[in-house]
Image (cartoon, helix red, strand yellow):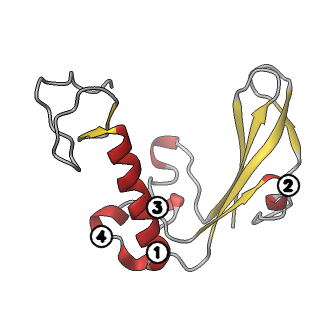
Amino acid sequence: MPPPKLREGQKCHLCKKEIKKSLCYNGFWWHSKCKDKDSAAKIRNYLKNPNSLTSSQCEGRIRKMDIYLGEKGLDASWQAPFPKEVKCHKCEGMARIMFVVQEVAGEKKYVCNLHENGEDDKYWPHDAIACAVYLCEKCFEPNALLNQA
C-alpha cells in the first residue's frame, strides 16, 4: 500500500519542521535524515540496554532466534544439516545459502503457535523450527527449507 499524499505544511515526526524535499513514511512523516538519526538512536539505546524496548515495540518479536549468515548456519538445524545449495523451485537453477534462523529452546513464542496444525486439513509446524533461506543465482528467487525439533 503506497503512503498517503504529502499534505502542504506536513511536519516531520522528529524535528517538527515542514517537510519540503527528502522524506520517508512509516505511519509518520519524516525527513530522511531525521528518520536515520532516530533509527540510529534506537539501535544505540538497544545495544546499551537490550531490555530498553517498550512492550509495544516488542509485540510479535521473538527475542531468542539465532541467525547465521552463509555456511556457518548449515549445522543450525533440529535434524540433519542443511545443504549448501538447493535446486530452485522456480527455474531449477542453483540456489545458494544466504542465512539460517533457528528458534531457541525455552522461548514462549514459536512459529508453531501462530496457527493451528491440522486445522481444515492444513499443515503447520508443531514445534520450534530452523529455516535455511537460499537465493537462486539464475532467477534471483528466494527458496527455503524448514525443519522442526
- Relative to residue 27, is residue 123 drawn left or right? right
Q: Which residue is mark 4?
A: 55
Residue type (three-letter) at the residue carrying disc 3 = Asn
The first of marks 1 and 3 along the sequence is 1
Q: What residue would you read off at disc 2?
A: 71
Name above or below for residue 71 compared with residue 16.
Answer: below
In this rendering, which labeled residue sits more in front, label 2 or label 1? 2
Tell me: residue 117, above or below residue 77: above
Give the numbered dot on residue 113.
3
69 on left or right of 27: right
Q: Residue at left 75%, top 35%?
A: 135
Closest to the observer, 124 or 91: 91
Q: Which residue is mark 1?
A: 108
Q: Quadrant of residue 44?
A: bottom left
Location of residue 99 in the rendering, given as x and y in whole percent from the top left corner = 73, 51
- Which residue type does callout 1 highlight? Lys
Q: Earlier in the sequence, mark 3 or mark 2?
A: 2
Q: Residue furthest left?
A: 9
Depth check, mark 3 against mark 4: the one in front is 4
Asked if the residues shown at circle 1 and circle 3 are in contact, with their CB atoms under 8 angstroms apart, the answer is no
